[in-house]
Image (tube, helix red, strand yellow):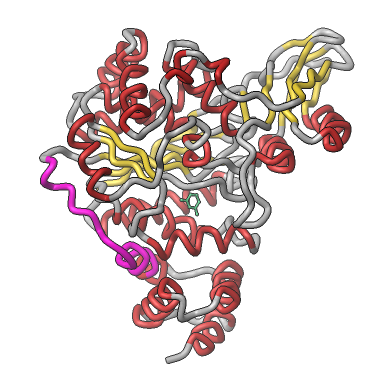
Amino acid sequence: MTILDIIEKKRDKKELSKEEIEFFVNGYTKGEITDYQAAALVMAIFIQGMTDKETANLTIAMANSGEVLDLSKLNKIIVDKHSTGGVGDKISLILLPLVASCGVAVAKMSGRGLGFTGGTVDKLESIPGYRTDITINKFIENVENIGISMISQTLNLAPADKKLYALRDSISCVESIPLIASSIMSKKIASGAQKIVLDVTVGNGAFMKNLHDAEKLAKEMISIGKLANRETVCVLTKMQEPLGYNVGNSLEVKEAIEALKGKMAEDVKDVVLELGAYMLLLAGEAESIDKAKNLLTENLQNGKAYSKFMELVKTQGGDVTYLEYLENFEESKYVEPIYSEKPGYIYSINAKEIGKLACSLGAGRVRKEDKIDSTVGVSLLKKVGDYVTKDEELAYLHVNNLEQLESAKERIKQIIKIREDKAEKLDTIIKVIK
Ligand code: URA
């Protein structure tokens, strides 16, 4: 068997066997298959799709491409969470310390920014000193000692996904159901999750643009979960406008810290409570969704969730003074206010466009080796449904490169759309699929 035969088969829309998929995954992980050959196969998969059987085999091969953690010695049910990606999605930073403070053990391996969406690892790394690349033993030790660890994919966990994730990002092959399902589920299986709660985002700012595709992705991941004996729940959430108010790495971290201190945007709170309630339920820490939501709300109000985040940051080497004094975070050189040119209701803030704008300012990568600028991005002051007067502040642009400022101002004015007619606020939670 050769990689050329495999590329040709998928190019011609034929089903790949388990052995062919394993040959590709193992060969690419070891560097025996080149980036350009892998790119050709990934593009063929993107265009031709995969059967459920192929997607399941790809997931298992990727999960087995490195170590598969056995966390049973922790004597706790490990419930993991993952999002299919979004703009302004700082949910993990708030949700995971919150559920950990309620007794759920959290062993979380997060990703970096992908396409126009941000990644939790890039955000965590904007806290000076925070180490996302600790050893497996330290990762497990942290979960054992403080009930939570959040790391990147630097460990030998699903290394095939790490390579494929970066490759897909650099060749515009992210928005594919089999590739997203296998990417997410391989990571969850490898990092030892027994139960999984997934935030499947839907809308212009998500990889799934419509409900039909999002349901298909959710069902695919649930069936892979069944096959691997990991109970999986998917919460479908709307991603039409950015989640919360900030887009950009340290801007989102600051918003997450404020949320843990009690000041949380409504849409962020909806997602945190819904996902959190299912995590508590699956972990056996609550008997019903309502009781779980009460417990979560209590731990947000009494400061336990914030204390858990402090503990996490401290344990992973981060400077906790930044959490206490948000002004310690470095600011971009220019912080430019954007004013409304007319009175009216905001009826659209296209999340994908805001994500692309933030990326173009340096918050994301164009090439996989690019460095992130943690200080840049967009702070919205308004959400869809809000009324604004003429000359009222709508947003701030955080920019380091003066040459980008004028065009960024023009772009954001086009993105935030205002009309005379009343516009409704957007709902956040669409449905839950089990
Ligand atoms: N998140 C992942 O981990 N992988 C994807 O492919 C998309 C979102």
Q: Residue at x 36, y 77 (%)?
A: 22
State the image coordinates of residue 128 (x, y, percent, origin top left). 49, 31
**The N terminus lies in which quarter of the figure?**
bottom left
Residue 253 at x, y = what percent?
A: 52, 27
64 in the magenta segment: yes
Magenta stretch in the rendered image: 58-74
Residue situated in front as seen by the camera: 208 or 260: 260
Decide: is 65 above or below 271.
Answer: below
Q: Is residue 335 left or right of residue 217?
A: right
Q: Position of residue 26 (x, y in %)?
A: 38, 75
Residue found 62% across the figure and 43% down from its top: 372
The quarter of the displayed image where residue 173 is located: bottom right
Q: Position of residue 402 (x, y in %)?
A: 84, 33
Looking at this view, is 329 or 228 the one in front? Answer: 329
How many marks the image carries: the answer is 0
**Would you identify the image quadrant in which residue 205 lies?**
top right
Q: Residue furthest bottom?
A: 1
The C terminus - image quarter: top left
Residue sitting at x 33%, y 59%:
156
Q: Pick the residue in front: 211 or 164.
A: 164
Residue at image position (15%, 38%) is 76
Q: Is residue 108 left or right of residue 118?
A: left
User: Is the residue 278 above or below the residue 228 in the image?
Assistant: above
